DNA sequence: CCTAAAAAACTGGTCCGACCAGTTGGCAAT
DNA sequence: ATTGCCAACTGGTCGGACCAGTTTTTTAGG
C-alpha cells in the first residue's frame, strides 16, 4: 500500500476520531513531513486526497483546516460528486430524461392496469389540489406513478437514479420554475394533458406530451440561467467568487491518444 | 485558484466530455503533464484529489482508471440479483436501450467532432473486417464509439451500466444471433446504415436506424426463444468470447486486503 | 524456426532541493 | 504611536532523480 494512502488514513483518523475539531488548523506540510518522516510530496498528496473528500480545506499562505461540515463517511455517491459542480450535467440529465419519461408515458398508456390507473388518478388529484408553491412531492409522485405503470423495472430503476442525481445537482426544477406564473400554468397544462392521454391509452400522445414537458422544463431552466436569474444550486460550491463560469472555457482536447 | 484544482476540474471534464467509460484507462501522469503543460507533481495532486472522491482508481505500474461505479442508489445489488435469472428483464433492458441507443445515435450525428468520426470509422472498419462469428468486442466497440460521440456523459454511463447488466443476464446478442445467416446480414446492414447516417450528420435517420436495430435484435431474440431454439444463457461467469477487463487482479486483491 | 529468458520501455511511488506566492508579525524609521 | 518594510512563516509549483511494479521487445538458447 502506497505511503500516501497510509498518511491519508492516519490523518483521517486523527481528525475523525478525536483531536482536531472542525475549523481547527492542521500542522503545516513541512511540519507533518518531518514528524511523520516522509517527504513533503507525500504529505501534499495525502492532503489533496482529504481535500477531495471534503474533509479539509486549504488556503494559500495560511494553512489547512478541518472542514466545518463533516458528514457521515458513508453517504457519498462517488460519481455524483463529480456531476455536481458541472452545470452542463443538468442539461445532459434532462436530455436523457426527455427520452425516458417519454417512453415511460408511452408504455404506461399501453400497459397500465386498472389499479395502475387508480394510483395515477389519485396522485394526479393530489397534485391538482396541492399548493402550487410546494407541490414538489406531489409532482414527483405523479410522475413516479406513471413510470411504475410502464411495468418496466429497468426503466423505473434508471429514472429513480436520474432523479437522485438531479436532486444532487440542482434544487428540483419545481423550486426554480413554479414561482413563475406563466411557467407554472404551462406545466399544469402538461400534467393534465399527460394524465388524460395515459388514462385513455393514447400511447403516442402520452409519449409526445411527456417529452415536450421535460424539454419545456429544460429550455425554461436554460433560459432562466442565461438571463442571470440564478438557478438555485446546492452542494459544495466554491465560496466567494459568484462567477457562474458555465463551464465552457476549458476545451483543450487532451484526449487524443489512439 | 491553484493550478492543481484547475487540472482536477479539467480532468473531470475530460472524463465527462470525453465520455470516458467506467474502467477506461486515463493517460499516464507523464503524458498528462506534457499535454497540459504542468509538472507531474501537479498531475499527481490532481489525481489524488479525484482518487479521494472515488472517481478514479490507481494501480502501481499499470495506470489510473475511471471507477466502475454506476450512478445509482444503494439498491444496486438487490437489483442485479433480481434481474439475473428473469428472462423478461432482458427485454425490458432492450426496450430501454432502444430509446437510449436511438438518442445516442441522434446526438452523435449532431455533435460528433472530426476525431469522433475518425474513431467511429476505425471501429466500423474493424467490425466489418472481423470474423462474423466472434465479433462481439468489435460490435460493442462500434456502438460504444457512437455513444461516446453523443458527448452526453450521463447517457454514456447509463448505457455502460445497461451493458453490464446485459452481460449478467445473457450472453451478448451477437452470440445468439450471428449464427443465423439472415439475421447476421440484417444486422450488418443496420451497422452500415447507422455508420453512414452518423457520418453524414443525419440525426433523425441515425436515431431511427439505431432504434430499429435494437428493436430488431429484441424481436429476433424473442422469436428465437419462443420457437424453443434456446438462447444461450450464462450465469455469473464470463464466457470465452467477450471478457470485459482485468484478468489478473483477484489474486492481488486478496493479498492486498490488509 | 520457435521458445524462453533477459533487457528495455513503459507505468506509478517516493524523495529532494529549489524557487514562487500569499500571510503574518516584528522591528526600524518616521 | 504609526507607518512601512523585511524576514519568517504558510502553501504552490517545478524539475530531476531514483525505486518499484508491469508490459513489450529483444535476444540468446534449444
Image (cartoon, coloured by chain):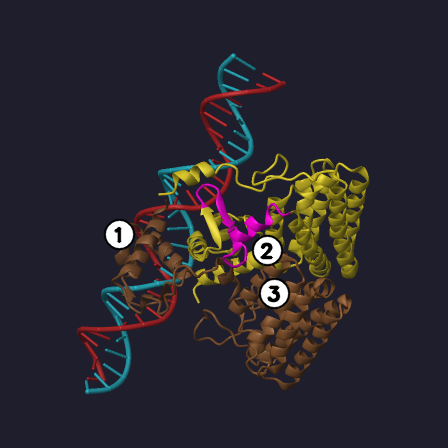
Chain colours: A brown, B yellow, C red, D cyan
| Cα–Cα span, label 3 and label 2 | 11 Å
Q: Which of label 1 and label 2 is nearer to you?
A: 2
Depth check, front residue: A10 or A36: A10
Q: Residue beneath label 1, please?
A: A36
Q: Position of residue B241 (x, y in %)?
A: 64, 36
Q: Secondary structure at mark 2?
A: helix
Instruction: Tell me, for residue A93, which label it has, or none.
Output: 3
Q: Which residues are magenta?
A: B59-86
Which of the 4 image quadrants contains residue B98?
bottom right
Q: Secondary structure at mark 3?
A: helix
Give the class, few, some or many, for how many residues have Cα within 10 Å of label 1's Cα (few <14, many ≥20): few
Q: Quick check: do tags 1 and 2 share a chain?
A: no
Instruction: Say whether residue A60 is magenta.
Output: no
Q: Position of residue B196 (x, y in %)?
A: 78, 52
Q: Residue at x 27, y 56 (%)?
A: A32
Q: Earlier in the sequence, mark 1 or mark 3?
A: 1
Q: Residue beneath label 2, please?
A: B157
Q: Residue at x 78, y 59 (%)?
A: B202
Which of the 4 image quadrants contains residue A151?
bottom right
Q: Are marks 1 and 2 in contact (CB under 8 Å)?
A: no
Apparent side of residue B231 relative to residue B46 in the rendered image (left or right) = right
Q: Determine the chain carrying the residue at label 2.
A: B
Instruction: Say whether residue B81 is magenta.
Output: yes
Amino acid at each position: 500500500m502506497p505511503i500516501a494512502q497510509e498518511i491519508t488514513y492516519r490523518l483521517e483518523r486523527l481528525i475523525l476520531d478525536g483531536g482536531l475539531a472542525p475549523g481547527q488548523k492542521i500542522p503545516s506540510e513541512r511540519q507533518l513531513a518531518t514528524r511523520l518522516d516522509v517527504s513533503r510530496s507525500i504529505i501534499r498528496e495525502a492532503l489533496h486526497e482529504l481535500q477531495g473528500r471534503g474533509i479539509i480545506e486549504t488556503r494559500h499562505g495560511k494553512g489547512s483546516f478541518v472542514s466545518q461540515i463533516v458528514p457521515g463517511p458513508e453517504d457519498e455517491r462517488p460519481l455524483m460528486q463529480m456531476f455536481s459542480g458541472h452545470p452542463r450535467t443538468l442539461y445532459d440529465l434532462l436530455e436523457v430524461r426527455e427520452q425516458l419519461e417519454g417512453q415511460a408515458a408511452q408504455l404506461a398508456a399501453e400497459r397500465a392496469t386498472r389499479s395502475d390507473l387508480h394510483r395515477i388518478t389519485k396522485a394526479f388529484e393530489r397534485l391538482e389540489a396541492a399548493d402550487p408553491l410546494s407541490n414538489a412531492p406531489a409532482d414527483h409522485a405523479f410522475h413516479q406513478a406513471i413510470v411504475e405503470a410502464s411495468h418496466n423495472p429497468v426503466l423505473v430503476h434508471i429514472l429513480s437514479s436520474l432523479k437522485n442525481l438531479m436532486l444532487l445537482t440542482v434544487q428540483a426544477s419545481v423550486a426554480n420554475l413554479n414561482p413563475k406564473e406563466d411557467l407554472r400554468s404551462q406545466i399544469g397544462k402538461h400534467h393534465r394533458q399527460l394524465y388524460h392521454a395515459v388514462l385513455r391509452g393514447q400511447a403516442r400522445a402520452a409519449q409526445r406530451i411527456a417529452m415536450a414537458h421535460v424539454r419545456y422544463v429544460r429550455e425554461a431552466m436554460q433560459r432562466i440561467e442565461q438571463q442571470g436569474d440564478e438557478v438555485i444550486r446546492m452542494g459544495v460550491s466554491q465560496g466567494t467568487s459568484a462567477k457562474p463560469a458555465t463551464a465552457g472555457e476549458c476545451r483543450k482536447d487532451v484526449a487524443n491518444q489512439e
